[in-house]
Amino acid sequence: MPDKKKKVVVCGGGGFIGGHLVGNLLEQGFTNVRAVDCKPCDNWYQVHRAAENLQLDLKEKDACHQALRGGAVVYNLAADMGGMGFIETHKAECMLSVLINTHLLMVARDQGVERFFYSSSACVYNGDKQKSPAVVPLKEQDAYPALPEDGYGWEKLFSERMCRHFREDYGLTTRVARYHNVYGPHGTWDGGREKAPAAICRKVIAAKLAGHREIEIWGSGKQTRSFMFISDCLQGTQSILWSDILEPVNLGSSELVTINGLVDMVEEIAGVKLQRCYNLSAPKGVNGRNSDNTLIKKLLGWEPSVRLREGMERTYRWIYDQMTNKNARKVI
Ligand code: NAD
C-alpha cells in the first residue's frame, strides 16, 4: 500500500488526466503531491492549490531533476498529444515526447524513485489488426510485430520498451498502461487537440445554440471505438502502478460504439436531431478498435465499467457550461 506522506509527482499535471489524478490523490489523503507541466498554470485544466504546482519543460533533463527532487512515486502523463486531427499532422512533435520519458526515466533511476508509471496508448497496436470496423478486440500481444500509429504510436511503443529495460537493467520499478480513448470533464474540447467524444459534444452544442441543423462528422461514421470515462482511468492507473503487472496492460472500456452511435447518444442528451455531413478526407484514424480486457480482469479482478451513456452525459454538461459560461471554474 502506498505511504500517503511520500512525495508523488504527476508529470503532465496541467493536462486532462493529470489534473484529475492530482485531485484524486489529494482526495485520498496524499499530503505531498507535486504537479508539473510545461504550460503556464493559467492554462492548466485544473489547478489544485493543495498541491505544489511547477511549470517546467520536462524535455530538459535539468527540469526533470527539479521535478523529481524528493519524489518517491512518479506518474508520467506528460506528452505532446491530441486527437487524430493533431497526431496525424504533428508526427515529429509527438515523437519528441520521447525526450520527456527518456529524461524522466534516467533521473528517476539516479534519484532512487520507488515506482514509475508510464501512460502508453492503444496507438501502439499493429495497424493491420484495426482495418475493419467489425473489430476483434486488441490483446496486449497484438502490439507485435510492430506497426503502430505513425509518429505518436512509435514514440509510445519505444517509450514503453524503455520502461521495461530500465526495470530489467537498473531495477527501477516501472509500470505501463495502454490507455484506450479517455474522456470526461476538464479536458480538451476545442482548439484542434480534442478527441471524438468532446468534439462531438462541442459540435452538437454549437449547432443547438446557433439553431443550425447540420454537423460535420470526420470519416464515414462507421468507425468503431471504445471510450473510457476518467474515473475508471484514475482507478486503473493507480491499481496498475501498485500491482505486480510487469508488462504493458490494456486500460480501456470494452463497450464498443460506432462514431454514428456516439453522435446518436449526444443528440439524445442534447434533445436535438441534426443532419450529418460526412467529411471523408478528414483524419479518422483506424477503422475499428476495442480493448480486450482479459488480462486486466485476470490480474486485477477489475475492468473499467462506467457506461458510455453516463460518462457522456457528464462530459456534455461540462462542455455545455464551458461554452455558455465564460467564468467556468478552474482553480480548486
Ligand atoms: P493532455 O494533453 O491533456 O495532457 C498532457 C500534458 O502534458 C499537457 O498538459 C501538456 O502541457 C503536458 N506536456 C507536454 N509536453 C510537456 C513537457 N515537455 N513538459 C511538461 N509537460 C508537458 O493529455 P491527456 O489526455 O491528459 O493524456 C495524458 C497521457 O495519457 C499522455 O501521455 C497521453 O499520450 C496518454 N494517453 C491519453 C489518452 C486519452 O484518450 N486522453 C489515450 C492514450 C494515451
Image (tube, grey):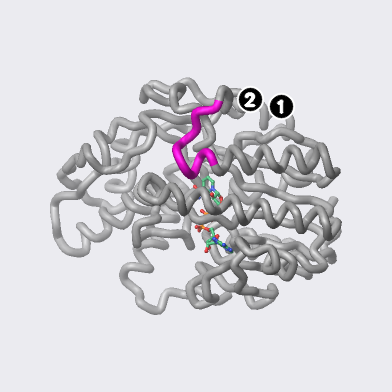
- For the record, the magenta segment spans 146-154
Q: Could you say where residue 122 lies in the image, as x and y percent from the top left?
A: 52, 36
As helix, strand or loop, the secondary structure at mark 2 comes to helix
Q: Residues within 10 Å of mark 2 (few under 14, many from 20)?
A: some
Please tell me which residue is depicted at 53% across the width and 53% down the height of the picture.
96
Q: Considering only vertical position in the picture, is 245 above or below 52? A: above
Front-lying residue, 238 or 82: 82
Please tell me which residue is depicted at 69% across the width and 56% down the height of the picture.
103
User: Visible in this render: residue 27?
Assistant: no
**Residue that mark 2 sits on:** 294
Q: Which mark is residue 31?
A: none
Please tell me which residue is depicted at 67% across the width and 37% down the height of the picture.
161
Please tell me which residue is depicted at 42% across the width and 74% down the height of the picture.
328
Q: Considering only vertical position in the picture, is 121 above or below 328? A: above
Ligand 1 in which quarter: bottom right
**Residue that mark 1 sits on:** 298
Q: Is residue 157 left or right of residue 136?
A: right
Q: Could you say where residue 222 lies in the image, as x and y percent from the top left?
A: 29, 31
CB under 8 Å between callouts 1 and 2?
yes
